[in-house]
Amino acid sequence: MKHLSILIFLLLFSLGFSQEYPERLSLQEAIDYALENNRTAKNATRDIEVAEKQKWETIATGLPQLDASINYQNFLKQQVSVIPAEFFGGNPGEFAEVIFGTKQNATATATLNQLIFDGSYIVGLQSTKVFLEISKNAKAKTDLEVREAVINAYGNVLVSIEGVKIIEKNISVIQDNLDETTKIYENGLEEQESVEQLQITLSNLQSDYDNLKRLEVIAYQMLNITLGIEYSAPLELTDTLESLAFQNLANETINAESDVTVTLDYQIADNDKRSKELLVKLEQSKALPRLSGFINGGYNTFADDFVFLDNNTEWFGFSLLGLNLDIPIFSSGMRGAATQRAKINLEKAKDDLTEVEQLLKLQIATAKSKYQFATEDYFNKKRNLDLAERIAQKNETKFFEGIGSSFELRQAQTQLYSAQQQLLQTMLDVINAKAELETITNTPSKY
């Protein structure tokens, strides 16, 4: 009974702390969930928190710093000094051995330090803002990439689902054709080759079906990992491939002018240039004086025995106020070389920013072209499927009327299957191409 109670407790404990996963998701719901639970997205959020803590850490270095210390000393053997013995009435030329101080002493001190001026500190404050902005841009970039990954994974699952449905329908049609052709052959009105052709087609379809079912499982697992949930958790998708493809067909955004300066890649490159500018200022600031002040105070006491915790122990106070001024004078060219190195890196960052701007213009133009082609190809593949369906239907009718060959029927059926798969792929291409364009231009849309 005791073991049963422990088992029930552990079960309830594990259930209480187990993560709850969504069971049904639209594409937008999947994106929203991933932005909160995807492991890469969560780490990017933590990077912002780290940057904020580092910002305060830098600010705090210029604020008052208070330290305290307690020092206790016990001389196991006190140091002996010698002085002329004549000081104590002795003979001239002789020395007397004496011990100065007590065997034990204790000191308690508190020191307040305040930075008054430091060029490096001023540059450090400016750099924390840039570093925080870099972290925020990296988070936004990560969110866009996670969003695109979710769209791709979600689309792959839908393609697998639709592909399985189409093949199941094709298998049913071919099985009916095979059954009917077998009966005709058994009655001596059809050649054996016609039966064998249909058997080959059915075998190929069955093989494709088995493969697609395996790919469907993998697609679901990939989507789960992208969402940040258990890879084998069951999940139902509420959007359809056709509806998403229709929603993503080319619109006015395809011809809209894109400002590369609002893209995250440009902003990240610009942040790098600004950080290099601050590094130049940092190296230059090292030639400036550094001024700080301090004030301390404390108490000390002396005794031959450990009586420092007694109420009647006498403590002697002391206090000190001071300034520290550090003036760099000569560094044998070290500071100058460091400044020149920082300036060279700044020039490199400027060139990198220009190159990023040019590459972004090219990437945007390429993404728009790819998106436009995917849209046009979708309508083309849709027309091709309609034609392939009519051709397959005509050849099937001709075959069973005895005026068409099994080879022509199989050729028409193969063409139909290819058109079906091509339309599925081009619908996925429309969705993915739109997501890629939105990722590059930093213009995510809602689904």
Image: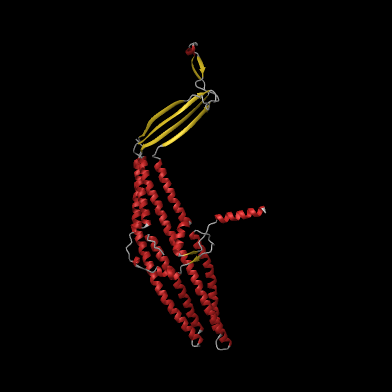
Residue 272's place in the image compared with 295, above or below, is below
Residue 220 place in picture, x, y as percent:
51, 64
Q: Is residue 357 visible?
A: no
Q: Nearer the viewer, residue 150 or 370?
A: 150
Residue 177's place in the image compared with 286, above or below, is below
Q: Is residue 296 visible?
A: yes
Q: Nearer the viewer, residue 315 or 252?
A: 315
Quadrant for the C terminus, please: bottom left
Q: Nearer the viewer, residue 349 or 102?
A: 102
Q: Residue furthest right?
A: 1
Does 202 sit left or right of 272 as displayed? right
Residue 426 place in picture, x, y as percent:
43, 70
Would you identify the image quadrant in which residue 5 lies? Answer: bottom right
Residue 295 place in picture, x, y as percent:
40, 31
Does 282 sit left or right of 218 as displayed? left
Quadrant for the N terminus, please: bottom right
Residue 232 place in picture, x, y as percent:
54, 62
At 41% from the left and 28% from the top, the residue drawn is 319
Q: Nearer the viewer, residue 95 or 118?
A: 118
Residue 18's place in the image compared with 279, above or below, is below
Residue 127's place in the image compared with 230, above or below, is above
At 43% from the left and 35% from the top, the residue drawn is 66
